[in-house]
Image (spheres, rainbow, N blue to C red):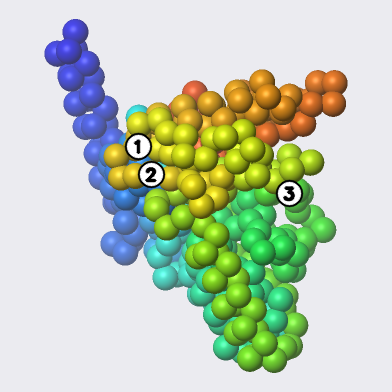
Amino acid sequence: MKTGNSTMAAQHINSHRQLAQELLKRVTSQTIVSADEPLAKRTTLRVGGPADLYIEPASEEDLKRSLNFIQEHELALFVMGRGSNLLVKDSGVRGAVICLSQSGFSNIEVNGNKLKCGAGAKLRAVATEARRHSLAGLEFLEGIPGTVGGGLRMNAGAMGGAMFDAVESVRVIDYRGVITELATREIQVEYRKCTTLKRAIALGAVLRAEPGDKTAIEKRMKECSQKRWTSQPSAPSAGCIFKNPASIPAGRLIDELGLKGARIGGAYVSSEHGNFIVNDGTASASDLLELIQKIRDQARNSRMILSGKTGQTRTRRGAEQLNSSSRWNHSAPRPLFALCGSSRNGKEAVWQVR
């Protein structure tokens, strides 16, 4: 039986390599394409298996060619940002993973009180560039360790601010390669969720800011940074795990349930912040998923706070909701983390759980 499994695994690896070699013939030499690419090193949680096909397009044209290739070969598609809110299952991601991290997608241009930002630009870099031009209102981005694209996909927020509070328009590409500029009013946005970007990939956005005093802006950014580093663990994590129920912050709820320090394998609930699960360096994705489910079960049993199997919460007789805060890849048995995710033909390659 082991010999049969080994033979099948070898066949899959060869198939992935053939796909990578074929795609490399269609894109420019600057585009990165690899088969069976380990994703653990590309996430802040440092767990997870490989992607069948990993792509970093060098340009929009190469992105279009990659999308055409993915459709042609009927591959599932997952688009990742900086990996700071992503949990990849131990078995990895089936299909293709696209990451818009190359310089062609990371530009930040300032024009008056607006910033035109590529999807691959780091949110902290956006906040820094706004400060450099004495533009206020984006200081909260300093505390979010993600990219513009990822921030848009989940309407990321911190320190009382949220991504779409500052968005004027978003430039997107659909899975056929058609590019469109969408005004905010045309985009479906909720708390920690942008439904529109389930069906398209963000290429960039125009953000609004207000003229401000540079010293005051610097002070607010330092306050955001200090609050983040003094209230959150430094060990590998994916940020806050759970969306806050209506009546109590998730971190406080977990603390009251006596779950700070709870551990499964190499994953444990941070003693510094109850809404963080961290990796001690030995955790697997399965450890994290099991610990998350343990927290959900205890919240349900002790407080009647429920969550659905695929992240769709259900409330019974006044029970509240406790959902995971990020998303995860389609091959996992239960929903969890991710920053930016989309899928071919509208079928989710990641599950929204927060």
> Is the residue 83 above or below the residue 115 in the image?
above
Q: Residues within 10 Å of mark 1 (few under 14, many from 20)?
A: some
**Residue of label 1:** 266
Three-letter residue code for mark 2:
Asn
Q: CA distance from mark 2 to mark 1?
A: 6 Å
Q: Determine whether label 2 and label 3 are within 8 Å by CB.
A: no
The residues bearing labels 2 and 3 have C-alpha atoms spaced at a distance of 27 Å
Q: Quadrant of the N terminus?
A: top left
- Residue 243 visible? The answer is no
Mark seen at residue 279:
2
Type of residue at label 1? Gly
Q: Which residue is mark 3?
A: 191
Image x and y of residue 283, in percent: 34, 37
Please indicate whether residue 17 sits to the left or right of residue 154 in the image.
left
Q: Amino acid at mark 3?
A: Tyr
Q: Secondary structure at mark 1?
A: loop
